[in-house]
Image (cartoon, coloured by chain):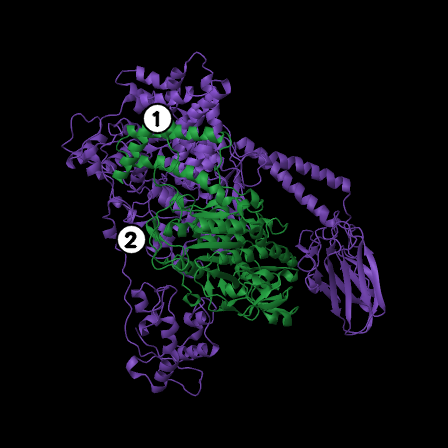
């Protein structure tokens, strides 16, 4: 550190120090005294508790700032140097003590005298005898970071040599090798009855019907399973199941919690995802469309629409639109989008780096702001008191676009014309600044009001910054007093300003209090004010100098809206002057106006019918962003060029052009074949959605705090396979479900349970609980009421917000509106993904509220009742035969003897009237709905 | 776990053979279910449970508990204030505002001589039990952000609610009821997020009872009653279900996790049996109902909510929030204009809150129950737009605590002489959270949950325990 000498222009208290920043050993006695008596005690208490080496050791250090050494106080913390010796104005410490920028100490400001001492001290060069240095921050070592398994290039591994001949696929070879090395047993292959149910639930999310089960069991050819898998993968039910998995990851929802605002167009994105999975859209394309679909060239209108809708994903965050700090809100939105992109596609927890370098992963803060810069150039909200998401018209064909443009141009012209005519009708609709009003003017802002008056600027002919109205309510409770001290004894013309309109009161009592008494004038506010379209004269009155002149507007006895805008006291001399005659345009006839308005309405209706979708737009001003120190939008650091995660960069860093956001490059980098994360993250998710657990059990976190792969080679193999198959999801899934590993029984074996209780090495299939959607779909399937209708908006028309929404119907669960304040109860209870957060893996809980739901919920009881009706329609069956059929439909197998005995006893052990019979069957099915084998997939 | 599971299996296996005779409850000890395991507190707790009385919308501190005689003197004058909304929108400090005195008279109460306005005469009579914190400040100028900050410690990011954190940290004191209950929560201003578990396991989500703006008498726990079956029919059906499950459990011999399915139904059955009595206010004496103002027009709703809170306390619910609010964008106490309306709200809550304090005390519950009265922010000491009300003020407002190990009859911290900005012993909302956790025996820096690669806390990287009030 070099010390500069300051010659101070000020002589402070007669103590000019020429050695302003002298090294510690040459401190003058006066400086020593100042520091030791006035400065050090304050630093020790209260500052050191959060800003010292001791604080750092106690993990109490705040803002990275150490004030306990000469070097530390000069170096400063996250916000930069705490002091600039000799320059109090540039010293952050002083600003903080004065509560100007930061507020320190936080509990209460120090006294003015103490703050003055600090100013003096800094002005004198902050002489400081203390030694000690601050340790440099450890830097992130990217090269070392790249050694982590997830950042290494994806290479297809060779099959292990110990592969057993019976293994049917490379997947099994890898799994068997690990299992055999650990001397684990292997469960037998599941029965075909178990397998068919497993495949239906896993690929469709709904159970097979008894006849579908029978058909599969009858087909004894070796290719039967493959055939079934092909058939299931080709059905639209597949996308409804697997699209929903993806919707978990991207926190899909159709409303936000703030005020329960609905996203009326969000369903388009849900349908987009379902279609994408059904059509086996290559996953790299799927990424590109979601991140930058609006910027991609398209070969067809359909493709253009699809890609545009894909970007809806960026807009679905549960943002607090009401946040008044819009700069912060803007960065919160960016942060939320980065969360979806980084955890969803890359399983990286970069959110940590918003405030500081990532503590565990090689992700510096710079990388965060390099990525944030890209999304900061993407507009997601239109800001207002309550900001709003962006809805855009869906792209249309060139012909249609031309037609729409034509209409829009016509509408714009019409609008302008109407506005002009109205302006004329209102007598010059631009606001008149107070300064331009002659005489003494009292604005509505200065009036003393009682009761609630509402501010407005709607009708533009007002005086000053706006006008106020009584909302047409609270009659007799509201008045406004305009008072002024007039400069001379004189007669004044008193004028009252209001903005006219058809909803106004026709008779507003306005009372003038003058030297000789008072007089009430009734003003018709429906009519245009005669003087310049703004004022009406209340007459001429005598006033005495320095006595209060007063005009009172009262809403007592009025009907309609009462307006107050301003009162003008115009000395007689001025009032007598004739205003310069201005050429006044004639107001248009009301007939013409209404005709034009009708034309406009018709045009607007035509253009409004155009479908809309939620999306983002490129910002007009494209720029790199600055580091936000400690994540605070108001303390900015270095500018960071836009870019990507350095540690996950194999090959040269792509450049981001200066003239657009960089979303395309971001999408290209994520979806690029060389990205070490994307394919691994994808295949791990697919594995988890099939098996219940991923090969890496933290699907959204492949960093150092996440899990490590149980089968690293298998993970690499699958990732490489997905690239080989050109990112086809269905190919990879097919390979997985046709593996022996997938087809194992879920029955535990004692020796396996002892050695590997969590089944990490896949010696059996996991016994899985059905999720909320499967449970719902299964109940509707069993009683035959499930409707196969695909896609479309599903929020009931006429719904104003999502409060207390009543869910219902017979469509698949994936189409039930995802409303953040009102999830369907079954979703809420059975661990549906939190629709505000990235959810790679749902919780699997087993709780009493779930049991209560299954026992008592009217919807569940209704489904059981319907099922009883359904099964009782087969009149030719006896109870035992019917029970067998009911078991096949609900749990996919005939009853065991113990079950059959209990059930039949229950059915027959009662009065045999028809009502009771029906009730008993309802109860049997109701019991099956609550049973383990209905709710769990073996 | 295993021997117990084997016993359960045997018991149920036996029952499955003659399920008709299956005893419905009391057969087996309580097991896994809704309640979380009780975790060891970090240090001796002063409070075992919390009742948070949420005054949605933001009552004005200078019209309730923060007496500022200067407002009277300067009433009607224009002075420069750092208005939070103006600063957020324009960055401009020192905007000119019209000072507005309180519409209500203040008087001193009790031996402590605490000042309370005539809005709260009955709460005033409990002044010697209250611990007034006059120097609160928080984040968020609008309801949405500030309400989330109050509940979750963040204005925007999705974070668990305080009740969820407490439940997660301490578990539940009872087996048959949820550990975190929110009575009549508002669907507005964050709605479900205000009692959400976010990334904590779903069992820590708040259970809601009723909804703000609807009659408290209709507040129910969902699915507690079966409306289709007669009691006898339901009992038989339940026996059938458990017999079926026992038989199926036997098929999956080695899968210990499935025990919890049967356990969950047992607990549900007990909840169905016990919970209605907790919610049944008709068992209370006439004197108690009167104490809370129940069956009196203005206080009936909030009185019922407060009495429910006491009954939940007794039943061992860990964290109970009671909301006085509605579903509007400008909720209950939000008097931007027409400040006199504060009196309507005060009349509806004054007696119920005083009744709750009296009742808790006479039952000895106040010793280990912390009562917290407060809102998302306070209001400005000047008129909004020179009108008839006051705007939001996140920079200085009052909350009070009672019972649960806080010093009674004290006032701590202070706002400036206008009651605008907290200046002495400032307490940030993070600090209040840290303090309440501390009272419950939790070190806010150690109550963490690993999510998305890092440890999260209710207080983020902030929070100071206000030891001075213990």
Q: Residue A365 appears in which quarter of the rendering? A: bottom left
Closest to the observer: B210 or A363? B210
Q: Which subunit holds the residue at mark 2?
A: A
Q: Is residue A765 left or right of residue A480?
A: left
Residue furthest to the right in view is A516
Using a 10 Å C-alpha cutoff, classify the residue at mark 1 as few (fewer than 14 neighbours), some (14 to 19) or many (20 or more). Answer: some
Give the percent coordinates (x, y) of residue B217.
57, 44
Tag 1 secondary structure: loop
Tag 2 secondary structure: loop
Q: Which chain is green?
A: B
Closest to the observer: A934 or A75? A934
Quadrant location of the C terminus of chain A in the rendered image: top left
Judge depth for marks 1 and 2 and give the one in front: 1
Q: Is residue A823 above or below residue B387?
A: above
Using a 10 Å C-alpha cutoff, classify the residue at mark 2 as few (fewer than 14 neighbours), some (14 to 19) or many (20 or more). Answer: some
Q: Which residue is mark 2?
A: A360
Chain A rendering hue? purple
Q: Is residue B98 left or right of residue B275?
A: right
Q: Is residue B365 above or below residue A611?
A: below
Q: Which residue is mark 1?
A: B18
Give the percent coordinates (x, y) of residue A795.
53, 35
Q: Is residue B217 left or right of residue A900?
A: right
Q: How many marks?
A: 2
Give the percent coordinates (x, y) of residue A196.
32, 23
Give the percent coordinates (x, y) of residue B213.
58, 46
Q: Which subunit holds the residue at mark 1?
A: B
């Amino acid at each position: 550190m070099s010390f500069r000498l300051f010659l101070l222009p000020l002589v402070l208290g007669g103590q000019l120090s020429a050695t302003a920043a002298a090294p510690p050993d040459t401190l003058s006695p006066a400086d020593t005294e100042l520091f030791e008596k006035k400065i050090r005690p304050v630093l020790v208490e209260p500052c050191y508790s959060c800003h010292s080496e001791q604080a750092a050791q106690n993990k109490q250090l705040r803002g990275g700032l150490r004030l306990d050494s000469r070097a530390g106080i000069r170096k400063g913390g996250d916000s930069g140097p705490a002091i600039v010796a000799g320059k109090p104005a540039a010293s952050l410490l002083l600003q903080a003590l004065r509560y100007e920028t930061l507020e320190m100490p936080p509990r209460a400001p120090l006294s003015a005298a103490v703050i003055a001492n600090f100013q003096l001290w800094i002005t004198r060069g902050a002489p400081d005898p203390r030694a000690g240095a601050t340790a440099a921050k450890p830097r992130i070592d990217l090269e070392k970071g790249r050694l982590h398994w997830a950042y290494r290039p994806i290479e297809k591994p060779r099959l292990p040599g110990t592969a057993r001949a019976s293994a049917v696929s490379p997947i099994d070879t890898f799994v068997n090798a690990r299992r055999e090395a650990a001397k684990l047993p292997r469960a037998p292959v599941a029965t075909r009855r178990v397998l068919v149910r497993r495949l239906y639930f896993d690929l469709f999310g709904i159970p097979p019907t008894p006849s579908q089960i029978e058909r599969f069991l009858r087909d004894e050819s070796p290719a039967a399973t493959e055939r079934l898998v092909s058939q299931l993968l080709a059905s639209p039910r597949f996308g409804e199941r697997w699209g929903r998995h993806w919707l978990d990851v991207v926190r899909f929802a159709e409303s936000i919690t703030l005020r329960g605002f609905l996203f009326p167009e969000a369903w388009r994105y849900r349908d987009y995802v379902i279609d994408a999975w059904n059509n086996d859209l290559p996953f790299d394309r799927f990424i590109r469309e979601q991140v930058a679909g609006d910027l991609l060239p398209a070969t067809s209108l359909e493709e253009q629409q699809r890609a545009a809708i894909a970007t809806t994903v960026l807009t679905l965050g549960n943002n607090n639109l009401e946040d008044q700090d819009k700069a912060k809100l803007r960065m919160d939105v960016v942060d939320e989008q980065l969360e979806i992109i980084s955890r969803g596609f890359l399983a990286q927890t970069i959110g940590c780096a918003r405030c500081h370098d990532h503590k565990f992963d090689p992700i510096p803060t710079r990388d965060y702001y390099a990525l944030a810069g890209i999304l900061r150039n993407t507009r997601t909200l239109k800001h207002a008191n309550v900001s709003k998401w962006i809805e855009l018209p869906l792209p249309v064909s060139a012909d249609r676009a031309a037609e729409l443009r034509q209409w829009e141009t016509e509408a714009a012209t019409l609008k302008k014309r109407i506005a002009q005519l109205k302006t004329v009708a209102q007598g010059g609709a631009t606001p008149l600044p107070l300064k331009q009003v002659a005489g003494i003017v009292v604005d509505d802002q200065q009036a003393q009001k009682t009761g609630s008056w509402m501010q407005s600027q709607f009708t533009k002919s007002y005086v000053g910054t706006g006008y106020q109205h009584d909302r047409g309510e609270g009659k007799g409770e509201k008045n406004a007093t305009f008072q002024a001290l007039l400069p001379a004894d004189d007669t004044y013309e008193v004028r009252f300003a209001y903005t006219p309109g058809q909803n106004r009161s026709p008779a507003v009592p306005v009372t003038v209090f003058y030297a000789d008494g008072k007089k009430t004038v009734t003003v018709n506010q429906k009519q245009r004010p005669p003087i310049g379209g703004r004022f009406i004269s209340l007459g001429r009155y005598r006033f005495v100098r320095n006595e209060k002149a007063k005009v009172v507007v009262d809403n007592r006895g009025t009907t309609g809206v009462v307006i107050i805008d301003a009162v003008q006291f115009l000395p007689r001399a001025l009032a007598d002057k004739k205003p310069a005659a201005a050429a006044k345009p004639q107001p248009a006839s009301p007939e013409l106006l209404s005709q034009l308005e009708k034309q406009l309405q018709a045009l607007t209706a035509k253009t409004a019918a155009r479908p809309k979708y939620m999306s983002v737009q490129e910002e007009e001003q494209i720029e790199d962003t600055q580091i936000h120190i400690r994540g605070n939008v108001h303390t900015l650091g270095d500018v960071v060029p836009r870019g990507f995660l350095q540690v996950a960069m194999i090959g040269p860093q792509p450049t981001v052009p200066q003239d657009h956001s960089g979303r395309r490059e971001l999408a290209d980098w994520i979806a690029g074949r060389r990205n070490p994360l994307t394919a691994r993250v994808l295949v791990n998710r697919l594995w988890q959605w099939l098996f219940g657990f991923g090969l890496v059990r933290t699907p959204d976190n492949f960093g150092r705090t996440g899990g490590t792969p149980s089968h690293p080679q298998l993970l690499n193999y699958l990732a490489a396979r997905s690239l080989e198959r050109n990112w086809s999801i269905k190919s990879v899934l097919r390979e997985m479900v046709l593996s022996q590993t997938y087809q194992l029984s879920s029955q535990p074996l004692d020796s396996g349970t002892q050695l590997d209780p969590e089944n990490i090495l896949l010696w059996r299939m996991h016994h899985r609980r059905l999720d909320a959607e499967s449970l719902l779909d299964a109940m509707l399937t069993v009683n035959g009421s499930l409707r196969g209708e695909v896609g479309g908006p599903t929020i009931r028309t006429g719904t104003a917000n999502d409060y207390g929404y009543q869910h219902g119907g017979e469509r698949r669960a994936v189409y039930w509106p995802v409303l953040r304040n009102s999830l369907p109860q079954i979703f809420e209870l059975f661990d549906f993904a939190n629709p505000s957060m990235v959810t790679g893996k749902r919780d699997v809980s087993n709780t009493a509220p779930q049991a209560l739901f299954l026992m008592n919920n009217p919807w569940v009881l209704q489904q059981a009742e319907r099922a009883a009706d359904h099964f009782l329609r087969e009149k030719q069956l006896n109870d035992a035969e019917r029970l067998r059929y009911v078991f096949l439909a609900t749990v996919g197998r005939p009853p065991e003897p113990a079950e059959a005995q209990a059930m039949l006893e229950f059915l027959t052990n009662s009065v045999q009237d028809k009502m009771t019979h029906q009730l008993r069957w309802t109860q049997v099915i109701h019991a099956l709905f609550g049973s383990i084998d209905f709710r769990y997939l073996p | 776990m295993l021997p117990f599971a084997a016993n359960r299996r045997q018991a149920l296996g036996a029952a499955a053979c003659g399920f008709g005779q299956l005893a419905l409850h009391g057969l087996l000890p309580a097991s896994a279910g809704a309640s979380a395991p009780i975790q060891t507190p970090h240090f001796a707790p002063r409070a075992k449970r919390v009742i948070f009385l949420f005054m949605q919308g933001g009552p004005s501190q200078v019209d309730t508990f923060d007496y500022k005689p200067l407002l009277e003197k300067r009433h009607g004058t224009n002075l420069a204030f750092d208005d939070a909304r103006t600063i957020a929108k324009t960055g401009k400090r020192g905007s000119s505002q019209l000072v507005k005195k309180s519409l209500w008279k203040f008087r001193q109460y009790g031996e402590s001589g605490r000042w309370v306005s005539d809005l709260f005469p009955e709460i005033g009579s409990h002044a010697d039990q209250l611990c007034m914190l006059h120097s609160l400040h928080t984040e968020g100028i609008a309801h949405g952000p500030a309400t989330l900050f109050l509940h979750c410690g963040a204005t925007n990011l999705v974070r668990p609610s305080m009740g969820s954190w407490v439940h997660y940290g301490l578990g539940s004191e009872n087996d048959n009821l949820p550990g975190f209950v929110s009575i009549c929560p508002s669907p507005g201003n964050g709605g479900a997020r205000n009692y959400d578990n976010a990334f904590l396991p779903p069992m820590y989500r708040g259970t809601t009872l009723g909804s703000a703006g609807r009659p408290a008498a209709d507040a129910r726990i969902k699915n507690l009653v079966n409306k289709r079956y007669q009691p006898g029919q339901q009992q038989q059906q339940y026996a059938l279900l458990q017999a079926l499950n026992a038989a199926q459990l036997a098929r999956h011999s080695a899968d210990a996790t499935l025990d919890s399915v049967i356990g969950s139904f047992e607990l549900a059955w007990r909840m169905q049996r016990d919970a209605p009595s907790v919610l049944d206010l008709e068992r209370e004496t006439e004197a108690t109902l009167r104490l809370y103002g129940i069956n009196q027009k203005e206080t009936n709703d909030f009185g019922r909510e407060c009495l429910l809170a006491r009954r939940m306390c007794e039943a061992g619910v860990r964290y109970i929030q009671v909301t006085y609010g509605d579903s509007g964008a400008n909720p209950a106490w939000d008097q931007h204009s027409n400040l006199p309306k504060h009196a309507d709200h005060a009349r509806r809550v004054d007696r119920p809150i005083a009744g709750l304090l009296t009742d808790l005390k006479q039952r000895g519950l106040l010793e280990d129950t912390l009562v917290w009265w407060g809102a998302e922010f306070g209001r400005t000491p000047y008129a909004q737009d020179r009108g008839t009300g006051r705007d939001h003020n996140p920079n200085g407002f009052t909350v009070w605590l009672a019972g649960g190990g806080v010093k009674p009859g004290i006032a701590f911290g202070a706002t400036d002489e206008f009651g605008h900005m907290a200046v002495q012993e400032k307490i940030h909302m993070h600090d209040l959270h840290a303090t309440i956790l501390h009272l419950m025996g939790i070190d806010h820096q150690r109550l963490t949950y690993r999510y998305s690669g890092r440890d999260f806390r209710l207080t983020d990287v902030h929070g100071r325990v206000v030891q001075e009030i213990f």
